[in-house]
Image (cartoon, rainbow, N blue to C red):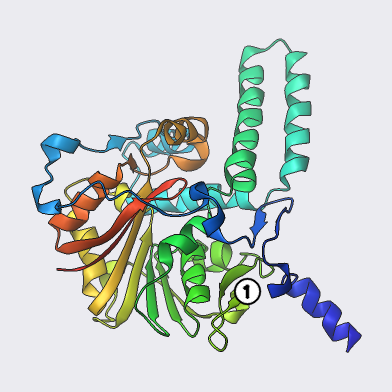
Amino acid sequence: MNVANNVSRLTKPYSEQQLGLTELTPSYRVDLRPHKDKAYEKFIRVNTVQDWSQLTWERIGKPYEVRTMSETRKQWEQEHEKAMDAKTSWTYFNKAFHEWFDKDIPQEISGEQSAFLKSLATFKPAEIRAALGDVARIHLWNYVHRIQDGVWDPRGKRSLFEGLNVSRPRILFLGAAEGYEAMQLAALYPGAEVVMVDYDAYCKTVRHGEFPDSYPFLGSSSSTGGAKVYYKPDFNIEYVVDDVRNLSFGKTFDIVLSVGLLEHFPDTYKPEVVDWHRRFLKDGGYAIFTTPRNQWKSRLFYVIMADIMNHTYRELMTVEQMGLYIYENGFDIIRHGYIKAHNAVIAQVR
């Protein structure tokens, strides 16, 4: 019995007895705090638009396009003498981005600082610039992902997702990557059935496959209605590797979710991307969209982290811009606002 308990503590190290806890691991933050104790840590409903039919592009302008591309993309395009196609760019991004989630960040910081000090002794500007760039990136990643928890943002996303009129929902996650947000939804709505879709097999085998089983998701208990801690193995997940355009599910999902998907498509393709959500929703179902916010912190992030992040077409939006794309393509906006790094909209088919 003691052996079983010890194994359980290793694979599921947190429980309901630790509600309110937050602590840093070498790679990420654990956060079991309620989201209502600080405004910054939750979904902020801005309600800036009372009537979406009256909003115009002339008034709000178009999104900010991130034009700084990664050196990897530039080199690929020089070698192939053509623009990198969307699927290749997404594959490069997934691999580059995921490598940062596995880092022992304090150890990396120490190593990069030592490398920078050594580069100074070479008096070679190119080596110094490269080493300084590595120092800047690891410190920024430490602050954004590990200290502020701005990538996963569990309290903000719990706040965004709560209060939906669903029970044991079917959830479809488009462009799922590691699937974090669908797992958080499943924790909030026990008994959920989750289907994750991404056309890059690396997302299924590595980004989702290597997501830590010991990471705790704070959710709700179906039996008591109180708080409960869940882990990845607790969820009912099917992961499909395919192009969204090939899916044949029909209108069978209570929630269709995308996180950071819409901003990767120029305006010509945005109606189709919005329609992907509508195609699979039951009557009365919810579409949930997020996109990176157009704020100075986000712009700086995509400049410093360009070699990791900028392999694909990318925009930064205001919540009004994102909402207008969604409204113009057949949805009514139920909630709109923002969390730490993303705008967020919950919508239903009009």
Which residue sits at x=66%, y=25%?
131
Residue 290 position (above or below residue 314)? below
Q: Residue furthest left?
A: 54
Q: Residue furthest front?
A: 37
- Front residue of this view, candidates 13 and 176: 13
Q: Residues within 10 Å of mark 1 (few under 14, many from 20)?
A: many
Q: Which image quadrant: the C terminus? A: bottom left
| Circle 1 residue | 231
Relative placement, left or right, of 339 versus 1 is: left
Quadrant housing residue 62: top left
Number of labels in the image equals 1
Relative placement, left or right, of 162 versus 129 is: left
Q: Which image quadrant: the N terminus? A: bottom right
Q: Residue furthest top?
A: 123
Residue 346 position (above or below residue 97)? below
Label 1 is placed on what type of residue? Tyr
Residue 157 position (above or below residue 17)? above
Q: Position of residue 135 (x, y in %)?
A: 66, 29
- Front residue of this view, candidates 88 and 347: 347
Which residue sits at x=29%, y=67%?
287
Q: Position of residue 285 (x, y in %)?
A: 27, 76
Residue 269 seen from this side: no
Q: Position of residue 110 (x, y in %)?
A: 78, 34
Secondary structure state at the residue bearing disc 1: loop
Quadrant housing residue 12: bottom right
Q: Position of residue 249 (x, y in %)?
A: 29, 81
- Front residue of this view, candidates 86 and 314: 314
Residue 199 position (above or below residue 78)? below
Residue 106 seen from this side: yes
Which residue sits at x=39%, y=33%?
78
